């Protein structure tokens, strides 16, 4: 099931719980904020998490003690627009202010975007449809839908998104991706130590791999996962061989190495997630 995570800024969102319920029925999960300041802080802290943003035309900017105005709307639009080089997130204006709908100056101030009327059910339905259509154009949203099982784990979302973007776009000549793969492996090794599968006395990256790939552990770590772990660690660890690996990736001599190593990492992530669930 494809779901869409949407940030909603509205000073009266608590009075509109039915809207959130209706959105959920359309597979749109809404996280609401009362002020533009709080909403944009959430937006900026996890920009890759959001598939869309819904803005009220008139509301609070920084505090619920303010008189509702357009200031918060313009703050949010400016913030979202300024982040276009990082991530393009579609935004929509959903208002209960009927005087705004025929105001040409206001329409220009919101970049000529369509206004959706809170009082009209057809507008709500169109808003849901448009959110899914626009969000579906986003590479990040496509990746989250295609790899929903990976994003359901506790893997570092920012790092895995970079790797899955490389996989989808066939970014095969950037050896920096190996560092991100290694980072996720180090996180998994740390959790293995916490679970007691690897001894805390083992501190070196390669030695953790050797310990986890011991045949005595195959009841816990399937042989194919051990092979994946060995391969990922051998390719990503630092050293003289890594210099040669990086050179071959950059030159195109190893055109499938980055993507194949990412795929091996995905196997490991899902195995480890399943193991933790089976052994809480």
Image (cartoon, rainbow, N blue to C red):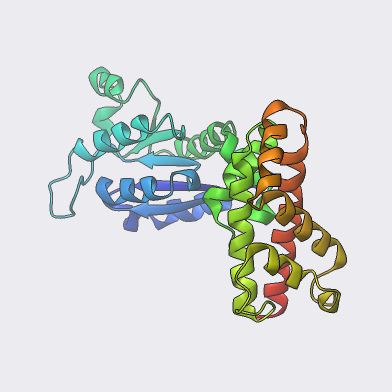
Q: Judge from the rendering whether residue 274 lies leftward or rightward of residue 97; answer left or right.
A: right
Along the line of sight, which residue is nearer the eye, 150 or 18? Answer: 150
> Does 5 appear above or below 77?
below
For the question of whether residue 99 can be seen, the reply is yes
Residue at 67% over, 46% down: 240
**Number of numbered markers:** 0
Q: Quadrant of residue 112?
A: top left
x 71%, y 40%: residue: 245
Image location of residue 229, percent across then percent down: 75, 60
The relative height of residue 249 versus residue 228 in the rendered view (above or below) is above
Question: Is residue 172 at all visible to an observer of this figure?
Answer: no
| Residue depicted at x 38% and y 46% | 43
Instruction: Spot the residue most to the front.
Output: 240
Split into 4 quadrants, where in the image is the C terminus?
A: bottom right
> Which residue is rendered at x = 39% and y = 41% of the image?
54
Residue in front for this viewpoint, 269 or 203 = 203
* Residue 196, horizontal then vertical, whole percent: 65, 81
Along the line of sight, the residue nearer the viewer: 3 or 89: 89
Give how far across and how far down residue 149 sits, in percent.
Answer: 69, 56
As drawn, 73 above or below 231:
above
Q: Which quadrant would residue 165 be assigned to in this image?
A: top right
Left or right: 275, with 214 as reference point: left
Foreground residue among 143 and 100: 143
Image-quadrant location for residue 14? bottom left
Q: Percent position (x, y) of residue 71?
A: 19, 37
């Amino acid at each position: 099931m494809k779901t869409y995570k949407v940030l909603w800024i509205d000073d009266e969102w608590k009075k509109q719980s039915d809207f959130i319920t209706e959105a959920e029925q359309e597979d749109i999960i809404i996280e609401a904020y009362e002020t533009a300041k709080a909403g944009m802080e959430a937006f900026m802290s996890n920009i890759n998490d959001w598939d869309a943003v819904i803005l009220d035309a008139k509301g609070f900017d920084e505090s619920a003690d303010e008189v509702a105005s357009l200031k918060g709307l313009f703050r949010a639009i400016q913030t979202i627009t300024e982040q276009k080089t990082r991530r393009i997130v579609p935004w929509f204006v959903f208002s209960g202010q009927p005087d705004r709908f025929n105001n040409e100056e206001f329409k220009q101030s919101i970049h000529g975007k369509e206004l959706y009327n809170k009082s009209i059910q057809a507008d709500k339905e169109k808003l849901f449809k448009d959110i899914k259509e626009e969000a579906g154009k986003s590479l990040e949203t496509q990746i989250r839908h295609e790899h929903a099982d990976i994003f359901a784990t506790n893997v570092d979302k920012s790092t895995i998104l970079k790797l899955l973007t490389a996989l989808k776009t066939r970014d095969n000549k950037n050896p920096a991706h190996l560092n991100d793969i290694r980072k996720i492996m180090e996180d998994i090794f740390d959790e293995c130590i916490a679970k007691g599968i690897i001894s805390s006395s083992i501190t070196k990256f390669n030695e953790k791999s050797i310990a986890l790939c011991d045949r005595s552990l195959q009841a816990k770590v399937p042989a194919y996962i051990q092979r994946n772990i060995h391969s990922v660690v051998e390719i990503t660890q630092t050293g003289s061989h890594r210099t040669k690996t990086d050179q071959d990736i950059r030159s195109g001599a190893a055109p499938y190495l980055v993507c194949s190593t990412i795929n091996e990492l995905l196997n490991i992530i899902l195995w480890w997630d399943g193991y933790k669930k089976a052994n809480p």
